[in-house]
Amino acid sequence: MALMDFIKKQFIDILEWTESGDGTLAWRFPMAGNEIQYGGSLTVRESQVAVFVNEGQVADVFGPGMHKLTTQTLPVLTYLKNWDKLFQSPFKSDVYFFSTRQQIDRRWGTSQPVTIRDKDFGAVRLRAFGNYAYRISDAKLFHTSISGTRDRYTVEDLDGQLRGLMLQHISDAVAQSGVPFLDLAANQIEFAVQLKEATAPEFAKLGLTLESVTVQNVSLPEELQKILDQKIGMGMVGNDMGKFMQYQTAQAIPKFAEGAAGGGGGSGVVGDAMGLGAGVALGQVMAQQLSQGLQGNAVAATAAAAAPVGLKPDEVMATIEKLADLKAKGILTDDEFTSKKAELLKKLV
């Protein structure tokens, strides 16, 4: 019976792997109880690494090229099996091939908003998504920590773990950058660079190199998006408060038209105007700003907008609160806010 088994046994003299493009990262050469012929050839292609494993212990690692399997080219396996220099018999060993080409267009994204800390706004919740690319750079580490003895290990098997690493380090990326969140959100390239630097060490622990990261979109909470839009608008008009008031007035015109068409009354229009920092009496602000043009004085324009004559106490307090909000957002300076507050308090009726 043993003789028949020996006759039926095939000796493998060529070991190679032709990738099929199905996303396989690690593939075990099928031995089926056969043995490898001493002096046989091992072909490793440019985008591959081959690893010999003896009884669960990683032995020799081969890079691209054609290798003749002898005791000279298998020094670790020779030591583990206690072969002598004259050993020329077929032998058993598990052989794993690993794809080292880049795995591109792997997707990451936040299924739920991620809370990050920002020096300007404290806790901020954001959504973001993009893609990344990686490759196996340490086949031995990848085998021992990830793929193990499985016959085949694919990119799909690993995707969930890698996406989790990307999301886990979003907060670190923002914190390490030292850049205010609104500036970082407006510069997605810088965001991607910081995310890559924060996540790459975790990929390395798995035997992987994180080659690239892109951030395709960052979605902010609605209130922060409004601040970002306002900041962009301020960038268009510079630091000229007169121009800023014109910008705010222009934004209020559609709301004024909507209120007039719908017959909603003056209170809604006044509320919108106050929300935009244009004052309580929108009609006065619009008339004054249109007459002043681009040469309007910034302080006079803000005072006219924020302190119309004959305000009631509750209106004064509401307007002061709105001005305080504008100061907190950096739209008004401390001196401008103090001046306007004093003028408003004098208008109490």
Image (cartoon, rainbow, N blue to C red):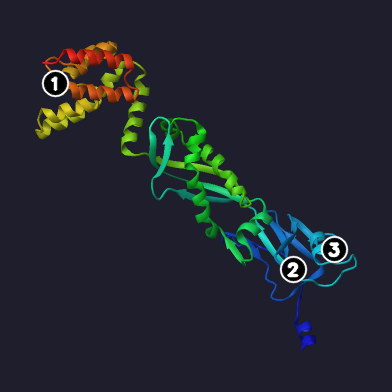
Residue ID for mark 2: 93
Location of residue 78 by image quarter: bottom right
Residue drawn at (23%, 12%), measured in percent from left and top? 292
Disc 1 is placed on an element classified as helix
Pointer 2 with pointer 1, Cβ within 8 A: no
Residue extending furthest bottom? 1
Rendered image quadrant of residue 319:
top left
Q: For the residue marked with disc 3, what is the amino acid?
A: Thr
Total label count?
3
Left or right? Give the position of 82 relative to 312: right
Residues marked 1 and 3 touching at CB (< 8 Å): no
Measure how far apart labels 2 and 1 are at the Cα level: 89 Å
Amino acid of disc 1: Pro
* Residue 83 x, y percent position in the rendering: 85, 67
N-terminal-most mark, 1 or 3? 3
Residue farthest along the right direction in this orientation: 86
Residue 106 in view of the camera: no
- Name the N-terminal-most of marks 2 and 3: 3
Asked which secondary structure carries label 2, the reply is loop
The picture places residue 181, in percent across and down from the top left corner, at 43, 33
Would you name the residue on which mark 3 appears? 71
Residue 192 vs residue 221, the one in the foreground: 221
- Residue 289, label in figure: none
Q: Mark 1 points at which residue?
A: 313
Circle 3 residues within 10 Å: few <14, some 14–19, many ≥20: some
